[in-house]
Image (cartoon, coloured by chain):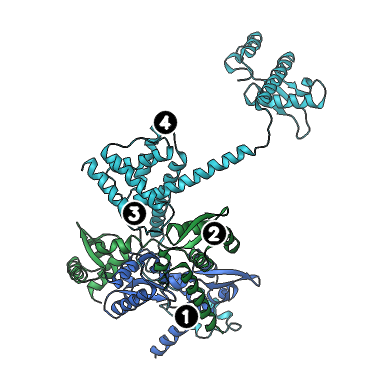
Chain colours: A cyan, B blue, C green
Amino acid sequence: MSFTSECGDVLNHLMFHKAIIEEDSGVGKEERLQHYLDMVGDMQNGTLVPSEDPFERSVALVFELVVNNQMNPWDINLIEFSKMYLSRIRKASELNLIIAGKIVYMAWEILRLQSEQVLQRVDRPEQVELMFDGWDPDHLDLFLEPFELGMGEMLLHMDEQPIQEKVRRKSERPVTLVDLLDAFEDAKRESDIRLELAKFMQKYRRPEFDDKAHKENLEEDIALVWERIQKCGGGSVPICDLYAGGKEDRVKVFISLLFLARIGKIHIWQEKLPFGEIFLEVKVPWDIAQLEDATVTVAAKVEEASVVK
Amino acid sequence: MRSERIIEAELFSAAKPVTVSELQMASALDSRTIRAALKKLMDEYNDSDRAIEIAKMGPRYAMQVKKEFTEPAGRLADLKVPKDVLKTASLIAYYQPVLQSKMFDLVGSRIYDDVRQLTELGLVKGRPKKKSVELTTTKRFIETFGIDARSRQEVKAWLEGELVRKKGKSP
Amino acid sequence: MRSERIIEAELFSAAKPVTVSELQMASALDSRTIRAALKKLMDEYNDSDRAIEIAKMGPRYAMQVKKEFTEPAGRLADLKVPKDVLKTASLIAYYQPVLQSKMFDLVGSRIYDDVRQLTELGLVKGRPKKKSVELTTTKRFIETFGIDARSRQEVKAWLEGELVRKKGKSP
């Protein structure tokens, strides 16, 4: 089949959906389908101009994939489709993660439904089962007086119950191209809401600290504390030796130590919980630590390493 | 295209029992035409020797396998209610609203597991009452078992009718 | 029990194309009887005016909606409107033209989702007005519900009449 005839299938599918829309149907649904029709028409003629809008480009990609892979627009294999779509957008410069997520979610829902059906089939109890299995006949006689059994007593002794699960047809409808496009619309709506929300947050954001200044301060603090550690020499050092007076200084030292521990420069430990003394020790790279008389080298190496990345 | 054929196709492809207004939504036929079509179809299916019938459950209609063919058909279908909890289900339907503690007296400790299964299937629901749980049947109970009833009272009455019928038959 | 009726029930409940050997396993009939039954059923269904046919696809058989009914019925079969949405629809019909914000007071935040569904179904349309949306019913609404009315005013009047009629009935 040629590209042109594949486009024809998609056009027919879209035209069917456009035809069943009533004149005063959903807002924009008809225009939307007309727009899709134009898009696929242009694609067929080779005159489709790539859009600036990332959503438009995502929709065009859907048509392209459906047409090029000769997918049946009445019955889209979502699992296959999402794989293709994801691998395509990975190559593209910008990702529309919301739309991709929506497709994966739809595919997952379908897979989950299918596996649930399989599980139910596996779970189905054996056909031949004793009706009285698990019933306790001794117990049945003990209690009867307070409860007016009436005709219901018959139910207790009947082999075949008057109720029976009815066998009906399980009806499933394949995912069609228009379902997929509807999901795209949802995704677009959701992403638009998110954009609006982001704008709103931007506008009404609480004035915050100047991040940059804050970061620079912290870097200075860490460098200062590192210098104090160096002065204390090797081995374990109680952190109170680093304090230079004042509550603020203690906080500065403590926070800096946490950073230094996190970037792997020092070990920190506490002897007794919760109020025991806290100690630190400068970490020595393993290869150098093996040399017994390497204290000088160690100090030099440690100093070479940048404190803050 | 004849309206009862459209409704036939609708019933066949519906995933669960449907109301006239749902059929209306799907077919764009008016409700009088739909009711007439349903009547025609019920005569056609239910009085014939076909294995399929059109059942009415209160306001809902469904195409389903006739009772006598349930067993062979059930093997290819996806039945959800285990046969061994049917007795508990019918007892609850008959005595409802009934306390779980009362049901314990009737069927023993298996009541807990049965009620859990029936609740998970949405066939029975429980409401805390008097340090126990009061059990009643649901709308899904009516649909699953294809009972022509609109309420719990009607389910009870239907069961009573079935029992009377059974009793009349047996010597 | 006639063998073609057993096969009929099985084809109906399988809801997917099945082979003769699958039918054999489910029915415990022999393959010759099954083939004869399938032949009979195909004659019976396919030559009639019924909306359902028995199709053969390679080695598999399936009961399905005939092609001419798939579009009016089958494709739309999934178009199900939940009851709560219908309630909202009737409220809109009754109060129309009505602002969405007014409807919010009536049914709460679900109005947004309901209106979206109803708009998609083409039953209700909205027009921006006074920082809200003014809702009215459509021609499709009239057709769908088989209401004898030509205009929104007549839909309102019809609903009013129905309400009065209902009220008169109840004690």
Q: Earlier in the sequence, mark 1 or mark 4?
A: 4
Residue C114's place in the image compared with A39, above or below, is below
Tell me the crowding category of disc 1: few under 14, some 14 to 19, or many 20 or more residues within 10 angstroms, Cα based: some
SS for dot 4: loop
Q: Nearer the viewer, mark 1 or mark 4?
A: 4
Residue C101 placement (x, y as % from top left): 58, 58
Tell me the crowding category of disc 4: few under 14, some 14 to 19, or many 20 or more residues within 10 angstroms, Cα based: few
Residue A18, disc:
3
- Left or right position of C145 against B72: right
Residue A262's place in the image compared with A112, above or below, is above
Which residue type does callout 3 highlight?
Lys
Residue C8 placement (x, y as % from top left): 26, 70
**Mark 2 lies on residue:** C111
**Mark 4 lies on residue:** A93
* Residue A128, picture quadrant: bottom left
Q: Nearer the viewer, mark 1 or mark 3?
A: 3
Residue A292's place in the image compared with A29, above or below, is above
Tell me the crowding category of disc 2: few under 14, some 14 to 19, or many 20 or more residues within 10 angstroms, Cα based: many
Residue B51 placement (x, y as % from top left): 29, 74
Query: Could you tell me which residue is drawn at 22 percent across and 45 percent down?
Result: A5
Query: Could you tell me which residue is drawn at 44 percent across and 45 percent down?
Result: A102
